[in-house]
Amino acid sequence: MSDISRIVRTHDGLEVILSRRTWKHIMTRHPELKSKIELVLEAISNPDEVYLDKTNARHALKRVDIVSDYLVVIYRVDRKGYIITAYFISSRRKRRRYRWFKKLIHY
């Protein structure tokens, strides 16, 4: 049985995999995302902002008004693209955390 749950294209056309194992991790660590798989995939395909961290992981941010202000989905696009994790974050925490990151896009 394949570990691939879903495949989504990033805003710049790269394929990213959401594995069953990663989705299980996200639901366990962040239960507020349990029924939000489509929102997680949309954050990658149609983000409001994308940042690059020092390990070259991308942080896709999507503005939401559900639990918090933003949904953050962290993913890599090395040889194979894959999602690492996802969580909600407030605007205040976003400003503090992402002020030193390199911004790739902002719509």
Image: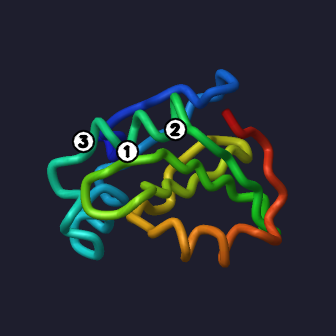
> How much space separates mark 2 and mark 1, taking CA atoms?
7 Å
First in sequence: mark 3 vs mark 1: 3
Residue drawn at 29 percent across, 36 percent down: 38
The three-letter code of the residue at mark 1 reads: Val
With respect to residue 73, does 85 lie above or below?
below
Q: Which mark is residue 40?
A: 1
In the image, 26: left or right of 95? left
Labels 2 and 1 touching (C-beta < 8 A): yes
The residue singled out by tag 2 in the image is: 44
Which residue is at 47% across, 40% downward? 43
Q: Position of residue 89 (x, y in %)?
A: 45, 68
How many numbered circles are shown?
A: 3
Tell me the distance, in whole angstroms, between the alpha carbons under discs 3 and 1. 23 Å
Q: Looking at the image, is mark 3 or mark 1 nearer the viewer?
A: 1
The kind of residue tagged 2 is: Ile
Name the quarter where the N terminus is drawn: top left
Give the label, 2 or 3, closer to the camera: 2
On the picture, is 76 further left or further right than 63? right
Residue 21: x and y in percent read 32, 59
Against 95, is 75 above or below? above
18 and 104: which is toward the camera: 104
Q: Is residue 53 above or below residue 105?
A: below
SS label for mark 1 = helix
Image location of residue 36, percent across then percent down? 23, 47
Q: Local crowd at mark 3 within 10 Å, few (<14), some, or many (≥20)? A: few
Quarter of the figure that contains the C terminus: top right
* Residue ID at (59%, 68%): 94
The label on residue 76 is none
Q: In front: 81, or 105?
A: 105
* Mark closest to the chain's N terminus, 2 or 3: 3
Would you name the residue on which mark 3 appears? 1
